[in-house]
Image: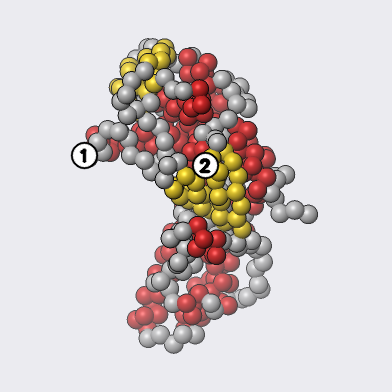
Amino acid sequence: MKDTAIRWLLPPRRDPIAELTRTVRKRHDLSGAFDADALVALYADVTEHEWHFDCDAVLVGLGTGRPHLYLRRLAASSSRRRRFTLGHELGHLVIPWHLGRTACHALSFEDAPNQSTSGAAGQQIAKQEREATEFASALLVPHDLLIMAAEQSTLQDLFDHLDAYNVSTMAGLLALRNALLPGFVFVFSNGEERWLMSPGSSLPAGASGSRRQLARVAHDMGAFECGGRRVQWFNLNESTTFELVDDERGTSEILRSAIAAQRFDDTTAKRLFMLINGIVAGKLSKDRAATTDQALSIARGAVRDDPRIPVAIREHDDFDLYLRRKAEERIANRRAAD
């Protein structure tokens, strides 16, 4: 039986932007590579112009009865980038707290908007740009469709299918990375080499310099085509199958045992106990893990190569048992809350 990609995909997010994206898709019965031009035309008047300014679109009249979207005319070869721009502008149009006028160059969460981000106003603009880009990637490559595909696909199969959504490289990768567990790295070139990581990821020691170094520490890797570019992917997570060893000790007692085995003084032992609990609990409190396998993978990733935690502790058998307990408790608490 092949190892399907579903084990690596997180449940859909429940934040306002994600919920709004699902509402728009449902309201307009969107499927496949839908007509983005026709969709945006329902919300605004659209005209195309040629200009040399460093922005792909200018949206005027947000919050009014009928906004006007001015699109930069792009070459036919840039049709996927145009779809991403349209999705981004639709985000501005439907997110209720986006008002006024925007000038956008929708690329990625990391790219700063063209307006200055200094001061409170600049920070608000940057936040709105990130929200619109997040909306666009989720609209063009829906999380629920990725989950459906992942149930019958390997990771390589899932990534190979991404190009079928008719999206730009960046739009596809943004959607992918938000659906995946921490520990995934995507590398591609668009004039210069770009690295995108799934949220919560950290690179192991010695893996930040090149693709070759990354390949040495990855547990799985491959390549696929999306938007006319070749993308290499690396999975830094071990293939985790959750098994909880019977042990009558409490979770805190298990961690104290792993620390005590190193014979630290009391002050150091207490500091390490608080530090490790804080790192693991903090990481798991923010995750969207649906299974104990996923929670354990996230917990292991949180402490992997952390220089603040002595290697001898991380390699102790009780330490991994502690991580398993924390993963089990996290999923049990989540299910109880649901």
Residue drawn at x 43%, y 73% is 309
In this rendering, the answer to whether 149 lies above or below 290 is above
* Colour pattern: secondary structure
The residue pinned by badge 1 equals 119
Quadrant in the picture for residue 327: bottom right
Whether residue 41 is visible here, answered yes or no, is yes
Report the front residue among 326 and 145: 145
Instruction: Provide residue 109's location: percent of width, then percent of height.
Output: 41, 41
The residue pinned by badge 2 equals 173
In this view, which residue lies farthest toward the right? Answer: 1
Residue drawn at x 33%, y 18% is 60
Q: Marks 2 and 1: which is nearer the front?
A: 2
Report the front residue among 23 and 73: 73
Q: Are marks 2 and 1 in contact (CB under 8 Å)?
A: no
Instruction: Provide residue 239's location: percent of width, then percent of height.
Output: 64, 61
Q: Residues within 10 Å of mark 1 (few under 14, many from 20)?
A: few
Residue drawn at x 66%, y 62% is 241
Q: Earlier in the sequence, mark 2 or mark 1?
A: 1
Q: In the image, 153: left or right of 44?
A: right
